[in-house]
Image: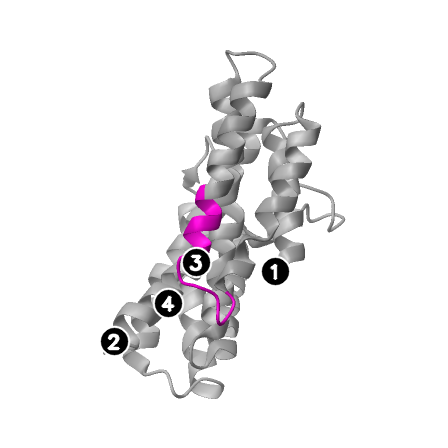
């Protein structure tokens, strides 16, 4: 988690703040430690306290170390958003892992995202006619998005049947589609960030496939959906 958070933050700040080398490194190193505040035995307030401390410290940093006062607000916002986008969302993987049947929930998340991605790609390539959101991602189609949702649902039901029978058929069916939809939106949002920053990929850690954020964009948005459904619907029920 530490390593993935650090690499993800490094990629994000590389896109968002290409001219602030020292601030990028400092924010990536400190932000990467945020998920540790959720480890078993930690005070429940440690995570929000750590996040609050980082936001205040970097706000003060830009207050006294700005280069161009016209850019100070935007640069401060970019740093603070990085903490929310990468370690905060990524921390839900740790929360899922610590929940009952946590490993199975993690793999259910991966199945939903990966089968959805594959189904969307092949459906869109074969039947795609209507553009989904050309301003952000010109290659995605409505048909591909629908095919991705169907693929995620089938993948989740198969996983539940053969690996996770403890999860009821109803819960599996109810959670698969919202998680899949949020995964697709996470993909679109990362595309928005890249286009806004004028880059093709978030990084080069996976040759031919981009950076770690290009691999995690869907998971970052889908993981909270699964976790909060588990936490507030299944466990309370």
Q: Is residue 137 visible?
A: no
Q: Name the image colouring.
A: one colour
Query: Which mark, residue 176?
Result: 4
Question: What residue appears at the point 52 percent right and 16 percent down from the top-left corner?
Answer: 71
Whole-Å distance between the Cαs marked 2 and 3? 21 Å
- Whole-Å distance between the Cαs marked 4 and 1? 24 Å
Marks 3 and 1 sit apart, C-alpha to C-alpha, by 17 Å
- Which of the numbered marks, if any, corresponds to residue 130? none
- Give the Cα separation between the discs numbered 2 and 1: 27 Å
Specify which label sits upstream in the sequence, 2 or 1.
Answer: 1
Q: Does label 4 or label 1 sit earlier along the sequence? A: 1
- Vertical order, 162 against 28 (above or below): below
Say whether residue 67 is left or right of residue 41: right
Instruction: Please give the label number shown on residue 222.
Output: 3
Mark nearer the N terminus (3 vs 1): 1
Disc 2 crowd rating (10 Å Cα; few below 14, some 14-19, many 20+) is few
Mark 3 Cα shell of 10 Å, populated few (<14), some (14-19), many (≥20) = many
Residue topped by disc 1: 1
Q: Left of 227 or right of it: where is 103?
A: right
Residue closest to the eye, 126 or 57: 57
**Image: magenta residue range:** 39-52
Identify the residue under disc 2.
Answer: 236
């Amino acid at each position: 988690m530490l390593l993935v958070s650090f690499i993800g933050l490094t990629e994000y700040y590389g896109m968002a703040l290409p001219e602030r080398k020292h601030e990028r490194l400092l924010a990536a190193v400190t932000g990467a430690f945020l998920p540790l505040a959720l480890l078993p035995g930690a005070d429940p307030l440690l995570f929000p306290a750590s996040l609050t401390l980082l936001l205040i410290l970097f706000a003060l940093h830009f207050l006294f170390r700005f280069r161009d006062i016209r850019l100070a607000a935007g640069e401060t916002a970019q740093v603070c958003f990085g903490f929310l986008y990468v370690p905060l969302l990524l921390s839900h993987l740790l929360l899922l892992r610590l929940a009952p049947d946590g490993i199975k929930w993690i793999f259910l998340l991966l199945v939903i995202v990966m089968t959805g991605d594959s189904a969307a790609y092949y459906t869109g390539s074969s039947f795609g006619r209507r553009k989904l959101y050309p301003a952000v991602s010109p290659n995605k189609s409505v048909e591909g998005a629908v095919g991705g949702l169907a693929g995620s649902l089938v993948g989740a039901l198969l996983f539940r049947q053969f690996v996770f029978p403890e999860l009821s058929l109803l819960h599996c069916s109810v959670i698969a589609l919202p998680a899949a939809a949020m995964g697709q939106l996470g993909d679109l949002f990362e595309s928005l960030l890249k286009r806004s920053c004028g880059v093709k990929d978030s990084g080069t850690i996976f040759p031919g496939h981009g950076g770690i954020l290009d691999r995690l964009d869907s998971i970052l948005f889908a993981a909270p959906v699964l976790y909060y459904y588990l936490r507030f619907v299944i466990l309370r029920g």
